[in-house]
Image: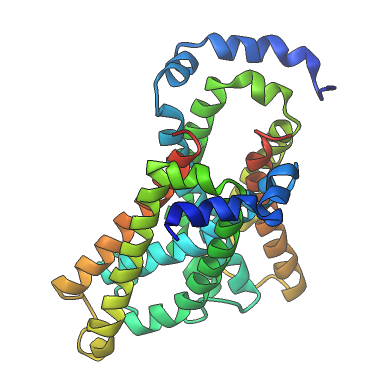
Amino acid sequence: MINFWPGSRPFFEWCERTAIGMAVRDTIWAFPFIETFHLLALAALLGSILLINLRVFGIGMRQFSVPQLARMLEPWILVSIPVLLVSGILMALSEPIKCFESYSFPIKMLFLGIAIVYHFTVQRKLRISEDAPPIRGKLGATLGISLWAIVSVAGRGIPYI
Amino acid sequence: MSFLNFFQWLEATPWSIAMRESEWIFPFVETIHVLALAVMLFPTALMDLRLLGLMMRRESVSSVRNQLMPWIWTGFGTMIVSGVFVLSSHPVKYYNSPFARAKAVLLVLAGLNAMIFELTAGRKVAAWDQGPPPFRIRLTGGISLLVWIAVVAMGRAIAYG
């Protein structure tokens, strides 16, 4: 199997020998326990992103304006991103070679980076106002949903491809 | 016919065999199942938190409910359909899994909790629609939140048990 960056293998081998990686690997039930937190935080993050961005299209919680909804749900996003990162790092450290050999993993990391930057630059502006021209607002909302959906799908793909 | 007979019969159907033999159906369905979790679980949690009186206190319960129910039902329907696909890929394995059984019991509990609520307190929503809800209503929200978190945990445990 070819790899995007074969030279990174020593890094993943080092990850495998870290104390945290070994602890997660050797503790029975640690992985599904951590994965449960990962999934709950995913539901909060992706759920918030969907509620806010579909509201831009006039779908969903219409009793709130877009900025109201974005302000109300922002704490969920700000809590779930660190929970996802910490639980994700723990899982990746426990089976880094699987991540190294997977196509999905680097794709997920790439889009995760883009999605986080996008959130803290463009997406968060929705909390203040939605006075962007409608077309741009809708493009931005579509991009917001797509980026996090790609991250989720690529994450689910790691054990398979 | 016992439950086991039914699951054995299901496992021998061409449908179930095709699910096992295909390399992509299972990961595809599993991905849908995870994405739908965001659509179903997060709005359910928001509804439960409103019933607990912890969020959106200035909005009436019925208004929050009307806004969230389409999400909850859309997500729930998708969860059920994709869940039936997952179940029918390895019916006997899931029949024998204590975690799959626990998940089934928890799903029934969540359903009963919601049904009892709809048939009793839910019908008299006008009496507690505004402001902090009475204890019974908060209890319903708390049970729902805990049961759904446990459903996710059991779902993850099935894959490792």
Q: Quadrant of the N terminus of chain B?
A: bottom left
Q: Quadrant of the C terminus of chain B?
A: top left
Residue drawn at (39%, 23%) of the image: A28
Q: How is the image coloured?
A: rainbow
Q: Is residue B35 visible?
A: no
Q: Of residues B154 and A8, which is closer to you in this image?
A: B154
Q: Is residue B150 left or right of residue A21?
A: left
Question: Extreme front residue here?
Answer: B1
Q: Of residues A94 and B94, which is closer to you in this image?
A: B94
| Count of number-bearing discs | 0
**Percent from the top left, x then y, of residue B63?**
39, 83
**Percent from the top left, x then y, of residue B126?**
25, 90
Question: Extreme right residue here?
Answer: A2
**Percent from the top left, x then y, of residue B112?**
30, 70
- Vertical placement of residue A2 versus B60, above or below: above
Residue drawn at (35%, 84%) of the image: B62
Residue drawn at (27%, 89%) of the image: B123
